Image (cartoon, rainbow, N blue to C red):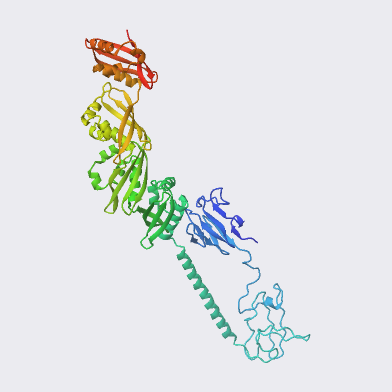
């Protein structure tokens, strides 16, 4: 006979593999019961025995009326009762039951005398002395010792004594060792005293067994009771193996509603604000009397976070009701980083110390950081000294790295200082941002000493406040910044609608990266804007240099300047430029008040766009 689970649907024989029990069809034993979870419980081999494990079910698994702790194996014993939902099973073990009557210590049964159990034992013959005693018949299975005598006194013998041996020879004695031999005078037994003593012994044994059973039941019930410590351990173990359903089931109904759905809980604990999944956790500082405990979590990123938990009892089971991470520099930097990445500038601003907040308002902070961070990574966080580094990645592909110093304010760690690492990318971004806001001193300070030697700060400011043919710079974008090659590109947009692209090479001076050289990319737009602006300001050499070699061969620079001095251009506007086709239009206004419109065609000569032909519109 095999070890089996016997239930209302028949016997389920247990084998060498685990038996899964649940509501969904992928279980080996499927129970169509709304109280049964999708994957409710499991019976798995454990050595020569089997163990029952609750898989974190909602309504619990019960063994002998006691609810099991989730994910804690319990060894099964013969006749154990298992309750799952509304279905009750009995655990059966072969060889633990017998069809033979139970033999109790101190008693002998009639079957031991060799009589068939279905027949009454033969009548005992009369004894040869004293009054005749009516033979006594014993029902099958009736105890031989302690059978009632017909009378008690000098005229009667107890029916408990056996008959004399037949003439054919002696019959085997059925007396216990040391009993008087057959035929010897025997005193009448003190039957009532022996029975009373026997019942006292039996009562004591039964009482001891009952008390022991009650104590054992109480001990088991106490050991299996739900406690905050067991709940926190189940939560920790489930998170370590990624069993988020079991972890979610350890939360109180109130905390579950704060997380939202189970799916939202899974998403949150898979990411953990950029820390990654929990790879290990340790329960400490638990106090079942106050319903509190602590988890030390280690994440895939290598970071650690300590959380304090509070518990509440719901329907006889302890559930996690609140969690509070302990403030650390690492946690503050991660919160800051994730908030910036999600454009949650209010949360990011709240991570700053009171000193840092006093230097800028929340609106100013948001304006400074609303420049398209797409990712950030916290590294080198040192909780002991309160420092850390954050690397930012922008939508343009640029990267910046900043070092942070933190202070503890009223038990909470706050960001107190920030120092950006000097890189070519940072120098270009600072330069672009300063020009865009008209902060020419800051922009000028991004130039190398060599570049500054070519123009004063005043000249630099004047040239960028209005560029001939383009107007004032209105926007710029840094792209293709490469810190390893010390190069980068800035695209400028001007008030007149024109765009200019400059390529830069940077140099490191005293550990600070500076812009050392600038090369403007030639485009049809730039050539026409330069031509227009030069004519408007009487800069005829620059205008003449925008002509192709073919066109310059048809007119000298002096002839060109003379012609435009006579018919002086007072204004001009570039329109309809197509850099791909190399075409564009300029509308000229002359000193005499007349206007003319020319359509131009340009060609690329040695990487520079030049005016090849101009055609006046009639």
Given residues 68 and 305, the one toward you in this image is 305
Given residues 199 and 602, the one toward you in this image is 602
Q: Quadrant of the C terminus?
A: top left
The residue drawn where x is 62% and y is 67% is 97
Provide residue 507's location: percent of width, then percent of height.
32, 36
Q: Quadrant of residue 559?
A: top left
Q: Is residue 206 above or below residue 539?
A: below
Q: Is residue 270 above or below residue 489?
A: below
Q: Quadrant of residue 502?
A: top left
Q: Residue furthest top?
A: 618
Q: Quadrant of residue 583?
A: top left
Provide residue 274's location: percent of width, then percent of height.
39, 46
Specify whether 203 is left or right of 430: right
The residue drawn where x is 68% and y is 77% is 112
Given residues 336 and 571, the one toward you in this image is 571
Given residues 592 and 255, the one toward you in this image is 592
């Amino acid at each position: 006979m095999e070890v089996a689970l016997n239930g209302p649907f028949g016997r389920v024989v247990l084998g060498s593999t685990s038996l899964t029990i649940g509501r969904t069809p992928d279980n080996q034993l499927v129970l169509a019961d709304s109280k049964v979870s999708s994957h409710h419980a499991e019976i798995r081999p454990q050595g020569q025995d089997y163990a029952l494990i609750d898989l974190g079910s909602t309504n619990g698994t019960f063994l002998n009326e006691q609810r099991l702790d989730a994910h804690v194996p319990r060894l099964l014993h013969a006749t154990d009762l298992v309750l799952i939902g509304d279905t009750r099973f009995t655990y059966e073990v072969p060889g633990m039951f017998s069809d033979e009557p139970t033999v109790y210590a101190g008693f002998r049964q009639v079957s031991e005398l060799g009589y068939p159990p279905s027949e009454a034992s033969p009548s005992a013959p009369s004894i040869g002395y004293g009054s005749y005693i009516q033979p006594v018949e014993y029902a099958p299975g009736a105890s031989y010792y302690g059978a009632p005598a017909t009378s008690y006194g000098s005229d009667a013998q107890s029916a408990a004594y056996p008959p004399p041996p037949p003439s054919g020879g002696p019959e085997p004695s059925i007396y216990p060792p040391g009993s008087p031999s057959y035929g010897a005078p025997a005193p009448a037994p003190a039957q009532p005293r022996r029975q009373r003593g026997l019942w006292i012994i039996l009562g004591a044994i039964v009482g001891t067994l009952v008390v022991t059973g009650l104590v054992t039941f109480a001990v088991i019930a106490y050991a299996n009771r739900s406690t905050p410590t067991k709940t926190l351990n189940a939560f920790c173990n489930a998170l370590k193996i990624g069993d988020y359903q079991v972890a979610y089931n350890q939360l109180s109904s109130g905390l579950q509603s704060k997380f939202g759905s189970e799916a939202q809980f899974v998403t949150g604990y898979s990411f953990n604000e950029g820390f990654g999944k929990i790879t290990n956790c340790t329960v400490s500082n638990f106090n079942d009397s106050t319903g509190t405990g602590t988890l030390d979590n280690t994440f895939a990123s290598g970071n650690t976070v300590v959380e304090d938990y509070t518990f509440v009892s719901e329907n006889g089971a302890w559930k996690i009701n609140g969690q509070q991470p302990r403030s650390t520099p690492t946690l503050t930097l991660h919160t800051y980083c994730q908030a910036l990445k999600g454009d949650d500038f209010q949360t990011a601003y709240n991570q700053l110390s009171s000193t840092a907040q006093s230097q800028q308002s929340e609106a100013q902070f948001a304006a400074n950081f609303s420049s398209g961070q797409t990712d950030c990574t916290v590294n080198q966080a040192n909780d002991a000294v309160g420092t850390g580094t954050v690397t930012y990645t922008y939508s343009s592909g640029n990267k910046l790295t900043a070092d942070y110093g933190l202070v503890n304010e009223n038990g909470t760690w706050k960001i107190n200082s920030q120092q950006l690492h000097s890189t070519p990318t940072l120098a270009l971004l600072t330069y672009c941002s300063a020009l865009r806001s008209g902060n020419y001193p800051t922009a000028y300070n991004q130039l190398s000493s060599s570049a500054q030697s070519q123009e004063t700060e005043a000249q630099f400011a004047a040239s960028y406040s209005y560029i001939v043919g383009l107007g004032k710079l209105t926007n710029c974008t840094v792209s293709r910044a490469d810190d390893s090659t010390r190069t980068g590109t800035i695209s400028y947009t001007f008030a007149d609608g024109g765009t200019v692209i400059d390529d830069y090479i940077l140099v490191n001076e005293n550990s600070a990266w500076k812009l050392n050289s600038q090369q403007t990319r030639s485009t049809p737009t730039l050539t026409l804007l330069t031509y227009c602006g030069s004519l408007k300001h009487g800069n005829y050499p620059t205008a003449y240099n925008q002509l192709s070699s073919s066109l310059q061969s048809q007119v000298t620079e002096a002839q060109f300047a003379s012609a435009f001095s006579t018919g002086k251009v007072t204004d001009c506007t570039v329109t309809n430029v197509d850099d791909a086709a190399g075409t564009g239009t300029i509308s000229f206004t002359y000193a005499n008040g007349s206007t003319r419109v020319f359509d131009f065609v340009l060609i690329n000569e040695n990487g520079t766009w030049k005016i090849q032909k101009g055609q006046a519109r009639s």
